[in-house]
Amino acid sequence: MNSMAKQIVRADSVVDATSARPVPSSGDAGTPPTTRDRILDIALDLFARKGYTETSLREIAAELGTSKAALYYHFESKQDILLALHRRMHHLMDAVQTPLPGTADATDSWERLIDELIGVLLRNRRLIEMHVRNREAVADLHRGALLERHGPVVRQDLENYVLGLRTDTALPLAQRIRRIAVVATIGGVLLGASAAFADTLDAELEAALRAVIHDVLGDRIR
C-alpha cells in the first residue's frame, strides 16, 4: 500500500485544511455571519428539508426572526436566494487545489484530487442534498435572463477530467474501472446521504467513505 492509499483512510487527511470546510461557511475565520449569510444558511436548511417550492419567504424570515419585507433588502426574490446558494455549489470546486494530472497515468495527482474531493463534497453534503432535491428549480437558473446572472460555470476542467475517466483508453482497463468505481462510490454516498446517513456524523461518514475508497483502490494503485 502506498502512502497516498494510507492517507485516504484517515478522516483528517485532507490535503489542505481550508479546502475541506463548507464553502462558504458563515462565521469562518472567527468572523460573525452576516445577515445575508444567515438568510442563505436558513434557506439552505429549509430547501433541503421541505423543498424550494414548498418553502416561503415568510418561513425564511420567521426562522431569521425578522419580517418578510426585511429580506428584500438582501434579495429581490426567493429565486435570488436559490441562485446565491447555487453559486456556493459552483465555488466548491474552487476549493480543490490539487492540479489536474497532466497525463493519464499521473496516479499520485489523481489520488490527491480524490482525497480533496471527499473532504470538500462530504463536508458540504447539505448543499448537495439541496441541489438534488430541487433539480427542477436549479435547472430554471440556467434558462432565460437568469442564465446571464448565473455567470460562467467554474472548474469545467475538473468536471471534464472526471468524466473523461470513462473513455480514456490510455489507462489499463482495470485501472479505469477502479477510478470510475471510486467516482461512483463518492457520488452514491452523496446522493444517498440524506436518507441513508441522516444520523451519521460528517466525520464518521467521511472516515468510512475513505476506508471504502481504499478498498476499491487496493494495493494495486499503480
Image (spheres, rainbow, N blue to C red):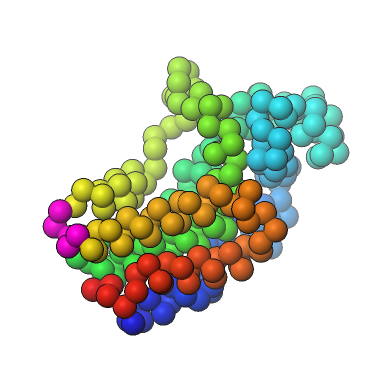
Pinpoint residue 26: horizontal percent, then vertical percent. 67, 52
Q: Where does the magenta region start and end?
A: 169-173
Q: Residue at x 66, y 61 (%)?
A: 200
Estimate the x, y position of residue 14 in percent, counting from the top left.
Answer: 48, 69
As drawn, the residue found furthest toward the left would be 170
Task: Report whether 221 appears left or right of 88.
Answer: left
The answer to which of 190 and 139 lies nearer the viewer is 190
| Residue 162 visible in the snapshot | yes
Q: Magenta segment, principal secondary structure?
A: loop
Q: Quadrant of residue 22?
A: bottom right
Q: Can you name the residue that lies furthest to the top here?
A: 144
Confirm whether residue 99 shows in the render.
Answer: no
Which residue is pictured at 73% across the width and 55% down the height? 32
Percent from the top left, x then y, of residue 199? 70, 58
Q: Which residue is drawn at 52% across and 54% down?
A: 189
Q: Is residue 38 magenta?
A: no
Considering depth in this image, is 78 or 28 the residue closer to the camera?
Answer: 78
List x then y, in percent, for residue 205.
Answer: 58, 64
Q: Quadrant of the C terminus?
A: bottom left
Question: Can you say which quadrant of the picture contains the N terminus?
Answer: bottom left
| Relative to 107, residue 74 above or below | above
